[in-house]
Image (cartoon, rainbow, N blue to C red):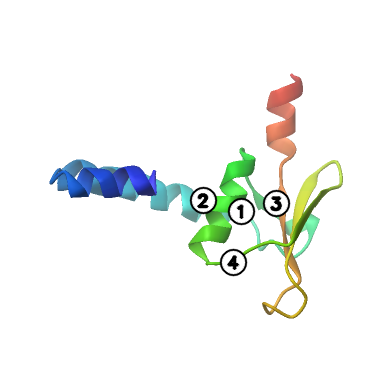
Amino acid sequence: MNYLAYLYHLNKDDATAKKISTNFHGLLGAILTSGDGLKCETGFHVISVSHEYVLLNMFEMQSQSQSYDGRCDYLQFEKDKYKIPGLYFNVSKLREKMFN
């Protein structure tokens, strides 16, 4: 959505760009207020795995590895690269959608 807003801006359709950008930031805000990502119980709630990588991209972070425990994805960072070792994303709603 962020890239789409940028394309509209490049095409001088700033009204549409602003609408899309507002929607994107609203979705990002919803994810960020759903938890803190520090443990599975407080993981960020996402409904698409791609949302995990959008969040990392927004914070200019890169994961080194990924694991899944049946409820949460855990994206681990390179040791001592950031102040936290990794982030948890609660994907339980995504799994419910897939198997119901």
Using a 10 Å C-alpha cutoff, classify the residue at mark 1 as few (fewer than 14 neighbours), some (14 to 19) or many (20 or more). some
Q: Are marks 2 and 1 in contact (CB under 8 Å)?
A: yes
Residue that label 1 marks: 34
Amino acid type of the residue tagged 4 in the rendering: Met
Using a 10 Å C-alpha cutoff, classify the residue at mark 4 as few (fewer than 14 neighbours), some (14 to 19) or many (20 or more). few
**Mark in the foreground, 4 or 1:** 4
Q: Earlier in the sequence, mark 3 or mark 2?
A: 2
- Look at the picture and state if 16 lies above or below 6: above
* Residue 96 x %, y %: 73, 28
Name the foreground residue: 5 vs 30. 5
Quadrant for residue 49, please give it. top right
The answer for how far apart the CA atoms under marks 4 and 2 are is 19 Å
* Residue 3 x %, y %: 36, 47
View extreme (top): residue:
100
The answer for how far apart the CA atoms under marks 3 and 2 are is 13 Å
Q: Earlier in the sequence, mark 1 or mark 3?
A: 1
Residue that label 3 marks: 89
Q: Secondary structure at mark 2?
A: helix
Residue drawn at point x = 15 percent, y = 43 percent: 13
Amino acid type of the residue tagged 2 in the rendering: Ala
Residue drawn at point x = 26 percent, y = 45 percent: 7
* 70 relative position to 3: left or right: right
